[in-house]
Amino acid sequence: MSDVLSDSRRTGALAAQSSESDRRLPLIGSSEPETRPDLINSGQAVGLSERKQLVRVENDRGLSLTESLVHYFYRLTWRTPLHKLRLKGRSPLRLLAAPDDPFTGDARRGKAIRAGFFQIAGAKIEIAQLNFATLQAPNEALDYIHSFAWLRDLAAAAPRGTCVPIAERLVNQWLDAHLETVSDPAWRADLAARRIINCAAHAPLILSSSDLVYRSRVLRNFASTARHLDHVADKAPEGLARLTAWAGVVAAALLLPDGEPRRIFGEAGLKRAIEGFMGDDGGALSRSPLAQIEAIRVLSMLRSVYAARGELLSPIVELALTRAVPALQGLTHHDGSLGSWQGAPGVSADTMATLMRASGVRSRPLREARHWGYQRIPAGRTVVLVDAGTPAMARHAIMGCASTLAFEMSHGPHRLIVNCGGASAIGPDYPPSLAKGLRATAAHSTLCLDDTNSTAVLPKGQLGKGVGLVELDRRDTDDAVRLDMTHDGYARRYGMIHRRLLVLRADGRELRGEDVLLPVPKRGMGRTKPAEAPFAIRFHLGMDVEAHPATDGWGVFLRVADGSLWQFRSAASKVTLEDSLWVDEHGNIRPSQQIVLSGTASGGGGNYGWLIKHMG
């Protein structure tokens, strides 16, 4: 990490109940007027269960005998050659509804589409030269184009009448390349599911044509994509991709005629997928806030589909959202913006607020998410966020970071202490070594021993050996909140345990910390005898902080953008200021600074105390 930061300084490049007989729904693709139903209330909230079973909620007794038989025969046709016949079934004459899109598109990207090119992930793709069959682009751009997420951006850029010809032309080009040919990435399960939901939400853009042949092709693609998802949803990678694929199956069941068997089949699959995605407290097993955001976004879109059909929201979706939302809110600062964890950039408060509204869930941020591994300490206008969990398992990790015991701190709308973040967000024009560096222990506000990671960072996003055990003791009193945490990431290599104590005063005006290196009590199992090793304790500063070293060399004055003054002090080590960086919501790398306490720990360990205090 130190090499990456050094290189960055040299180059300057880093510096979201009424039945059908009670209410008539629009028939999208038919000759009826294009009206869209208002969102319908999703029904009474479902109580949060402590168990992982996401369907067994109050008053839910599972599938009836008839439903079980329908589900059995649906799966029977899916697992046999009859599936090929299902893929070639008849096309629907219409969609049963056009759900509202609860998310606002990016007008800047929409204007770029109107000007003749896709602009995404640092790539500029000219539409006039675009061949959907042989498209080569960064993965993020491929996902954006094949999922039809660009429909949302186009709709945000101009009135519908202006956008319809552009949307129809692009859809027709895509159908020319992929309607008859199933291939990746265009037909990848999660992208196919997103495409169904996005096309339905923006059906007025792509199904307003009087060209019956074109409209028939679009509706045929809806049906064939639904049949494709029936077959491949359970084969998608476990986690977000599988959850998204099954959400697409359920959406197709609600949007296409005669969908009840598919709905029973799809909701059962979605239940399994959700259980494979999140833990008991609602956090993604990958520990990735970005994956959590995308899951909430997909489920919120699916919620909108239920509403457009006048259907009561499935308890599966309801309960998943009521768990996932407060867990994600637990990683937000005082102003509602998201902390920089597990490769996520600093997502803005506005983006988070939009997501929360789309989910339909009102809740308090979760303070203790022990399964997800995060702790949140609010005090007055101050919030401290802490990674107090073991790293995600290799099969779940997405841009996993060696961030154990790191913390962030904010006061009001201003971030004081941050992590660099953004390994998942930086553009493809940056070297791969930078993304790996942003995942390193040194890119987080915690102790790093001998310039090595507490957990090995592997190139493809997974994590290797390192932290296997994290111990946590949290005590909340009227005067303060105290976290006492340890991890064993350096035990085998250096014979040391890292212990971190954090005490946040109830008024939020003082955070006391102590980092302790302790010799491993017993040798054995390959553990190394403790020896001298250099250490560095880093405190990466937020963009709103102007730092000035104290004249005695033992502290730093922190002037925040609102004019308030804070002081960092340590009696255990001299304090230095060094260059750092922070990645914002758009993947831009912003130069910043970091406070560093450094020295050499003896074989007997060491204690290093510090203080962050509001001065006025």
Image (tube, rainbow, N blue to C red):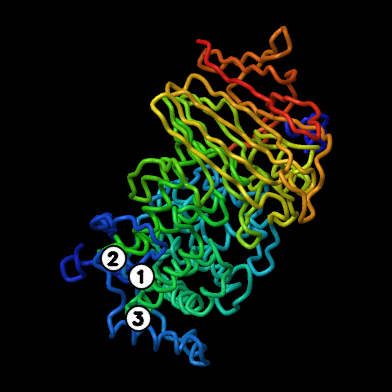
Q: Is residue 443 left or right of residue 483?
A: right
Q: Position of residue 62 (x, y in %)?
A: 31, 74
Q: Residue at x 54, y 42 (%)?
A: 472
Image-based side of 106 in relation to 420, left or right: left
Q: Secondary structure at mark 2?
A: loop
Measured Cα–Cα span from mark 1 to mark 2: 8 Å
Task: Give amino acid for label 3.
Answer: Pro
Mark 3 Cα shell of 10 Å, populated few (<14), some (14-19), many (≥20) = some
Residue at x-position 36% and y-position 45%: 357
Q: Nearer the viewer, mark 2 or mark 3?
A: 3
Q: Are the two marked residues, 2 and 3, in contact with CB atoms closer than 8 angstroms?
A: no
Foreground tag (1 vs 3): 3
Which residue is labeled 3 in the image?
261
* Residue underneath mark 2: 309
Q: Are marks 1 and 2 in contact (CB under 8 Å)?
A: yes
Residue assigned mark 1: 255
Which of the pair 330/6 is nearer the observer? Answer: 330
Q: Position of residue 562 (x, y in %)?
A: 50, 16
Q: Give the alpha-carbon distance from disc 1 to disc 3, as whole Å.
A: 13 Å
Q: Is residue 544 above or below residue 34?
A: above
Q: Could you tell me residue 599's position as x and y percent? A: 79, 26
Up the image or down, 208 lies above or below 524; here it is: below
Q: CA distance from mark 2 to mark 3?
A: 16 Å
Please rate how many residues cluster around mark 1, counting C-alpha atoms within 10 Å: few if below 14, some from 14 to 19, many from 20: many
